Amino acid sequence: MEKKKTGFFEKLKEGLSKTGGGLLAGIFLGDERIDDDFYEELEEAMIIADMGMETADALQEQLRDKIKEEKLKTRTEAREALAEILADAMRPEKDFLPSGEKAVLLIVGVNGVGKTTSIGKMAAYYKAEGRVPMMAAADTFRAAAAEQLTVWADRAAVPIVKHGEGADPAAVVFDAIASFKAKGCDLLLCDTAGRLHNKKNLMSELEKIRRVIAKELPGIHTEVLLVLDATTGQNAIAQARVFGESAGLTGVVLTKLDGTAKGGMTVAIKQELGLPVRFVGVGEGIDDLQPFDADEFARALIGA
């Protein structure tokens, strides 16, 4: 597992080094002076890396205070200080899934962000961790969505419940819960239709699914995770804001960090919206989606 994690971190670092990570790393090379130029370069790099003006200003102010308090003299020292600040800014306040408890993961997001594949990879991850996952193919709107999820269920060797195209998604979840109980599973991962945030009927459908879960599995720990394409930058934050208002989000899954993503929106999502990133994806392989680690991500962002 440690070897797998190391390989994943290298992929993450390599992906971010192409864009945002490279930009943040560049200001710590060569000149060691901490002067006005340093702060200007840092602010520009943070904004280009998709952190947004508000978050960039707040983080830079924290760094200024830390440099002053700890009497830091070089950019190398400032780099380590920034890594700590970034990690703290992204760190979730509480653990994701309580160990030993049954749970439901309701996965939402617009089409094309990697939602279905993320569910398959999460199922594989948790099975390897000793949990007993099941999938519910509640995206009955998109043609072949259930078939795509079935392929991932087979790859992960995880049971799946599905209906035909056009079926009631809440009915799929209802049947999945019955099977979930009968098979003694402890983690139910529910796919949902790719929702455009301005479609009220689709949001109503999501609310119906949540009512079914609350009725059939009263008191069960439920997470609502929004899958976001990291390459869309600030648009991802706009999506998260709208979904957060409508879907009762508890966290985010960031995909495609191996592409042109700059990674800074991870900080902004947590700082501006209070949503922790729970998983990050760096490739197509079944092991290329792993739980988010704030310390590792911060170091990858600054090219450490």
Image (tube, helix red, strand yellow):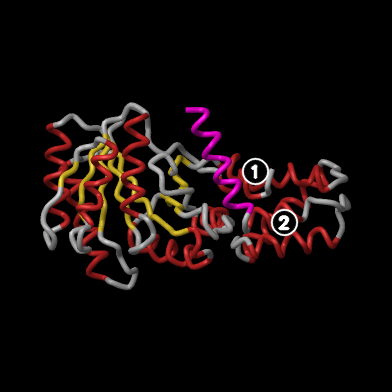
Give the overall secondary structure of the magenta segment.
helix
Q: Amino acid at mark 1?
A: Arg
Residue 258 versus residue 204 in the image, above or below: above
Which mark is nearer the camera, 1 or 2?
A: 1
Q: Position of residue 77 (x, y in %)?
A: 80, 42
The residue where tag 1 is placed is 299
Q: Give the residue type at disc 2.
A: Gln
Residue 10 position within the rendered picture, expressed as x and y whole percent measured from the top left:
58, 41
Q: Nearer the viewer, residue 193 or 164?
A: 164
Q: Which residue is mark 2?
A: 60
Q: Residues within 10 Å of mark 2 (few under 14, many from 20)?
A: some
Answer left or right for 49 relative to 96: right
Q: Which residue corresponds to the image point at 12% horizontal and 39% vertical from the top-left? A: 178
Tell me the residue at 52%/57% (across/down): 259
- Does residue 285 appear left or right of residue 52 in this picture? left
Which quadrant is the C terminus positioned in? top right
Q: Is residue 289 magenta?
A: no
Q: Element type at marker 2?
A: helix
The 10 Å Cα crowd at callout 1, few under 14, some 14 to 19, many 20 or more, is many
Q: Secondary structure at mark 1?
A: helix
The one of 17 and 122 positioned closer to us in this rendering = 17
Tags 1 and 2 in contact by the CB under 8 Å rule?
no
Magenta region includes residue 2: yes
The one nearer the camera, 288 or 274, is 288
Q: Which residues are magenta?
A: 1-17
Q: Residue 111's quadrant in the figure?
A: bottom left
